[in-house]
Image (tube, helix red, strand yellow):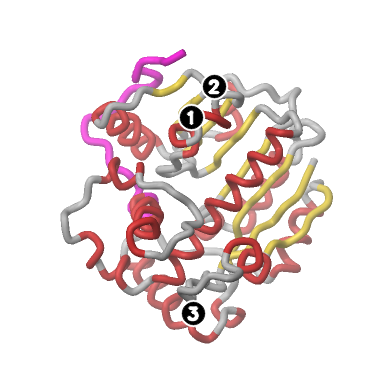
Amino acid sequence: MKKALNSFEISTHPKPDSSAVRTALWRALHVQTDAAPHILEDEIGLKLVEPTDDWQQRPDMKFTKRLRASIVARSRFIEDLMIEQSQQGISQYVILGAGLDTFAIRRPDIASALQIYEIDQPDTLAWKQLRLSEIGYELPGYLHFVPVNFETASWWDQLHKAGFDNRRPAVIVSTGVTLYLTKDAISATLKEISQLAAGSTLAMAFYLPVTLLDEEDQAMQEMAEKGAKAAGTPFISFFDPSEVVAMSNNAGLKNARIVGTKEIERLYFSGRMDQLRPASGEIFLLATT
């Protein structure tokens, strides 16, 4: 069952978040320039963005191979987690900070058995909804856009208004978000997530301080921090893995563990002949309720 593109009011000139655009282009660049087998096959975001012909020569595309590898690996990691959980009967999937995620459109074989809630800023979701229509996609009935102005509204309240059933377990994921939040805001979010029904799973990305990165990644991280600050979206929060586990435990979550770069390398990069490897700055918190 399809639904029309009228689930919320579209602003006159909506614009997507620049980091969401960059992430979508990195996924497409992986398909177009990295050797097979590809970790993730996703070029829908490229169709949404419709960049200029020279997009692959942008500095944030041309000189960020390890970051690109991290992005496609984290998308694959999340996708594998959701597929595994759906096979165990979980039917609700919440993407906090969804950006230009394409799982619901790209994998209907899995997604059609779920209720998927994409939460993000109103402009990003409005733009995405509009562009999906323009390139020939309709929102499937199982996909729910949940626009939230995080400065003035509660994502938790808006999620439930969108039809989320807190009596049933869910998978909730968050990538590329904690960098921009204070530690207090992250702790509050974790406490809200701990209220999900028993049997729910959280996968949330956190970012290491530059001193804990591999030496080859430190200069790129410092450049990224300067660029984010200049763009008015400064990076705020970095964490040692032990801090992340402590925050999870304090919030009431269970079975907290960290998935770091070495485990991601083992899962998705073993045996590759092109030397593609992920950057060392991102770690995942996995926890349950």
Q: Is residue 84 left or right of residue 73?
A: right
Judging depth in this view, the residue of 42 and 176 nearest the camera is 42
Instruction: Identify which residue is drawn at 66% across, 49% down.
Output: 203
Instruction: Identify which residue is drawn at 72% across, 52% down.
Output: 286
Q: Is residue 58 left or right of residue 223?
A: left
> What is the total number of numbered labels drawn onto the structure image?
3
Judging depth in this view, the residue of 179 and 201 nearest the camera is 201
Quadrant of the drawing holding the C terminus: top right
Q: Mark 1 — residue?
A: 146
User: Which badge, 3 or 2, is on the more N-terminal residue?
Assistant: 2
Question: Looking at the picture, which amino acid does disc 2 mark?
Answer: Ala
Vertical relation: 247 (above or below) 121: below
Q: Position of residue 51 (x, y in %)?
A: 21, 51
Question: Looking at the picture, which amino acid does disc 1 mark?
Answer: Val
User: Which badge, 1 or 3, is on the more N-terminal residue?
Assistant: 1
Question: Looking at the picture, which amino acid does disc 3 mark?
Answer: Asp
Q: Position of residue 257 (x, y in %)?
A: 77, 59
Residue 105 image-quadrant placement: top left
Instruction: Identify which residue is drawn at 39% across, 50% down.
Output: 20
Q: Which residues are magenta?
A: 1-20
Q: Position of residue 234 (x, y in %)?
A: 42, 63
Q: Is residue 135 left or right of residue 65?
A: left
Q: Is residue 120 left or right of residue 25?
A: right
Tell me, for residue 162, which label it has, or none: 2
Vertical relation: 12 (above or below) 57: above
Asked if the residue at tag 1 contacts the one at tag 2, i.e. Cβ–Cβ closer than 8 Å, the answer is yes
Q: Main secondary structure of the magenta part?
A: loop
Residue 2 image-quadrant placement: top left
Q: Mark 3 — residue?
A: 217
Instruction: Identify which residue is drawn at 24% across, 66% down.
Output: 58
Q: Work out how far the residue at label 2 is from the one at label 1, CA to CA, in angstroms.
A: 7 Å
